[in-house]
Image (spheres, rainbow, N blue to C red):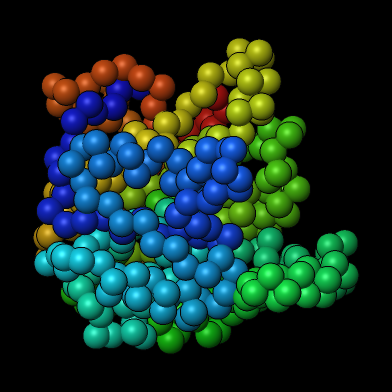
């Protein structure tokens, strides 16, 4: 796959907003290297001249608490830029949307929000975990909540990620802001590897919602201008936390790795450089019209030469099923999600 060696540097800093149980950096011991949520992604963006902020919000607290922490992190940044863009993974997209709708005035203007596998319509796996009639894990929840509370962690995030909460409470009360551009991406994996932690969640999600990345469905990922679906990519692959053991087994079977998370975020930065400063247009999909039937996977158009046109290219293991501007108004042809 062909990816760019150089990108157009975005005008505004990028704020990377992490998801559930996320962090910026985690040091488990003085003897171990620092663990980064955005594994290699921040450094790659910085190397291209992008100013990157990586705030930390409470890992499992309510959306409101996490959004408040996100706002405080922006307020603490100095010097204050003219504006920022937010690139959010998973629940981080809900934090960003809440902050924009409920915590104004903000300390800095937000020009655009890009959500990556954010459960805008909730997650069927969250429903499953909280359903005492079907989930074998439900009876462990009180003990889990107690452990979290003793550690000073919140537990409100779990119930707020259900489909009912998003449909009946969050989305109706959290409108998009007219001066902010909203973009989104989804992901879908056909069958997680045998050792993948997403194997059981994926089965639950597939039965309830259709194509998904192991935790969030393609349908739920849609918000604003939908840029498309990354095929053969799990929820953690999206932040470069690839299951190395699983991919080693796949390589033994002759299956090549088909996704490069760093290349993906570099392409997002390039897209923001070109589109984040443009005024929002009337033909951008409003949230109410972004519904896609669950049997439809939008496979992004990639020409045989790679991602778009340009001279600064190099052949690398890159992004499958990704381009900057797919037409989501028409039904795209199905693509085989099996790696070749």
315 on left or right of 129: left
Image-quadrant location for residue 45: top left
The N terminus sits in image quarter: top left
Residue 299: percent from left, percent from top: 42, 40
* Residue 249 position (above or below residue 335): above
Which residue is depicted at the point 85% across and 67% down? 140
* Residue 223 position (above or below residue 149): above
Residue 122: percent from left, percent from top: 57, 68
* Residue 333 position (above or below residue 129): above
Residue 296: percent from left, percent from top: 50, 49
Nearer to the camera, 281 or 123: 123
Q: Is residue 284 visible?
A: no
Which residue is depicted at the point 33% across and 50% down? 227
Q: Is residue 165 visible?
A: yes
Nearer to the camera, 214 or 67: 67
Nearer to the camera, 85 or 211: 85
Which residue is depicted at the point 31% across and 37% down? 44
Residue 163: percent from left, percent from top: 60, 72
270 on left or right of 204: left
Nearer to the camera, 261 or 146: 146
69 on left or right of 30: left
Which residue is depicted at the point 62% across and 58% down? 209
The residue sitting at the front extreme is 30
Looking at the image, how many numbered discs can be counted on the residues?
0
């Amino acid at each position: 796959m062909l990816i760019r060696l150089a990108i157009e540097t975005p005008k505004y800093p990028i704020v990377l907003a992490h998801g559930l149980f996320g962090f910026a950096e985690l040091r488990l011991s003085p003897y171990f290297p620092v663990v980064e949520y955005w594994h290699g992604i921040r450094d790659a963006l910085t190397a291209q001249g992008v100013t990157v902020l990586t705030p930390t919000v409470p890992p499992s607290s309510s959306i409101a608490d996490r959004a408040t922490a996100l706002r405080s992190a922006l307020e603490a940044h100095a010097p204050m830029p003219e504006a920022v863009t937010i690139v959010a993974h998973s629940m981080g997209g809900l934090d960003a949307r809440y902050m924009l709708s409920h915590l104004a005035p903000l300390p800095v203007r937000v020009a655009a929000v890009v959500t990556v596998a954010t459960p805008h319509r909730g997650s069927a796996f969250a429903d499953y975990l909280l359903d005492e009639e079907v989930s074998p894990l439900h009876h462990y929840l009180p003990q889990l909540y107690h452990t979290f509370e003793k550690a000073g962690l919140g537990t409100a995030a779990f119930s707020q990620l259900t489909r009912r909460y998003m449909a009946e409470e969050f989305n109706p009360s959290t409108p998009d802001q007219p001066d902010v551009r909203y973009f989104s991406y989804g992901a879908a994996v056909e069958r997680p590897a045998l050792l993948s932690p997403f194997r059981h969640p994926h089965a639950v999600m597939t039965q309830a919602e259709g194509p998904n990345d192991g935790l969030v469905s393609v349908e739920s990922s849609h918000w604003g201008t939908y840029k498309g679906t990354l095929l053969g990519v799990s929820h953690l692959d999206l932040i470069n936390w690839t299951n190395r053991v699983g991919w080693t087994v796949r390589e033994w079977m002759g299956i090549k790795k088909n996704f490069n998370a760093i290349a993906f975020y570099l392409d997002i930065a390039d897209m923001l450089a070109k589109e984040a400063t443009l005024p929002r247009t009337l033909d951008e999909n409003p949230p109410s019209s972004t519904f896609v039937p669950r049997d439809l996977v939008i496979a992004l158009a990639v020409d045989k030469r790679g991602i778009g046109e340009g001279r600064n290219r190099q052949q690398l293991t890159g992004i499958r099923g990704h381009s900057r501007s797919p037409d989501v108004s028409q039904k795209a042809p199905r693509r085989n999600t099996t790696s070749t």
